[in-house]
Image (cartoon, grey):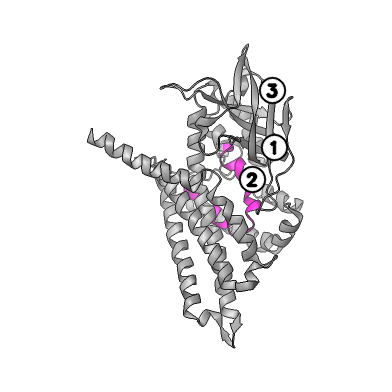
Amino acid sequence: MTTHAPEVPDDVFADVLKQINHFVHTRVLPREIEIMTTDAIPDDLRKQAAEMGLFGYAIPQEWGGLGLDLTQDVDVAMELGYTSLALRSMFGTNNGIAGQVLVGFGTDEQKAQWLPGIASGDVIASFALTEPGAGSNPAGLRTTAKADGDGWIIDGSKRFITNATEAGLFIVFARTGPATNSDAGIAVFLVPGDAEGLDVGVKDAKMGQEGSRTADVTFTNVKVGPEALVGGDGKVGYRAAMTSLARGRIHMAGLAVGAAQRALDESVTYAASATQGGTAIGDFQLVQAMIADQQTGVLAGRALAREAARLYVTGEDRRIAPSAAKLYCTEMAGKAADLAVQIHGGTGYMKEVPVERLYRDVRLMRLYEGTSEIQRLIIGGGLVRAAKKKAS
């Protein structure tokens, strides 16, 4: 077990969290309908987010970020999850799955070249892992990187890549050879968004999360130099993917708790004011039971997300706990949103009512960064393997 001394002291972090809460409630919440109908984050909100340091809140201070650790990141995610999830998506990959690959595995030269721009928001980083035939399991990658002198040639396609339409940097995972007992055969590369042979498709039309942008990305004979290989090591790709995803799953758990809290708050407010036959619907016991289930889920999810973050930071558990937190919290958020629509009745099915958007937004959380089914396999398989190892 390692000691934990965050870069940002508790009192400073409390002020950061207060500012984010104020931004979310006073600037973003009033414009949720605008974000939904225009399918975009307004430029002034993006500018303010950048000025607040939100594009680099989880990037170390030496590279221009705020330097929040994962235990603090989770509380930030809970604040951001309270509003349109597209807001967090705008800078989520910079702080999370993309940026953390550089933070954890990049060379000093790679960090110096890219992290300051990522932290400021001048560079948008995309995490290019998912493919048509390889989603939650990176072992199924078909994108290839072949040695070309001292550089590489990348060929293949990626799907559902967040922020691909405006990315200045793609963190690209590619197969360099067949997997062996000692090497997964996967490397990760830094590919500039303007690289020749890189093509970004049209923005995906999605069920929810309007304002967030995903698209297919195709690599056709894309040539990169030796400096593009993350860590200068062709064997770190699989470990970088797994490490970044595990960390991201805890962040996702916090985000789900924030969304569930919003579903609960909307439900309580509506139940206390809407009437049926002259009686507030919140006085009906069956409505109270639904609210009770929401509240219980939020409290349990918040505790689990924070504990998983603590275990990750200390190094005690960076595999089972992240998956457990992601599984429980995203499933819980889905149930909370469903109950919110039920409590609102027909009103909850109407566009421009917050719980209608929330219901669609949270559905994706059980799919990206590893489906609920994959999380169950990681948890169950990991515990069984540990028991076998202990027995032998």
The type of residue carrying mark 1 is: Ala
Vertical placement of residue 300 versus 98, above or below? below
Q: What secondary structure characterizes most of the magenta part? A: helix
Q: Which residue is mark 2?
A: 91
Which label's residue is closer to the chain start, 3 or 1?
Answer: 1
Note whether residue 65 is visible.
no
91 or 110, nearer to the observer? 91
Residue 227, given in percent of the width and then of the height, sits at 62, 21
Instruction: Pick the quarter of the image with the N terminus.
Output: top left
74 in magenta: yes
Q: Considering the numbered disc 3 on the image, is that residue within a helix, a strand or a loop? A: strand
Q: Quadrant of residue 23?
A: bottom right
Vertical placement of residue 174 versus 333, above or below? above
Kindly indicate whether the residue at mark 1 contacts the one at mark 2 (C-beta within 8 angstroms).
no
Which label's residue is closer to the chain start, 2 or 1?
Answer: 2
- The numbered mark at residue 222 is 3
Residue 344, given in percent of the width and then of the height, sits at 60, 72
**What is the CA distance from the residue labelled 2 to the residue labelled 3?**
26 Å
Q: Is residue 142 left or right of residue 46?
A: left
- The numbered mark at residue 31 is none
Magenta stretch?
71-99
Q: Considering the numbered disc 2 on the image, is that residue within a helix, a strand or a loop? A: helix
User: Crowding at label 1, few (<14), some or many (≥20) Cα neighbours within 10 Å?
Assistant: some
Kindly indicate whether the residue at mark 3 contacts the one at mark 2 (C-beta within 8 angstroms).
no
The type of residue carrying mark 3 is: Val
83 in magenta: yes
- The numbered mark at residue 167 is 1
- Residue at 48% over, 76% down: 286
Instruction: Pick the quarter of the image with the C terminus.
Output: top left
The type of residue carrying mark 2 is: Phe
Residue lying farthest to the front in this orientation? 133
Which label's residue is closer to the chain start, 2 or 3?
Answer: 2
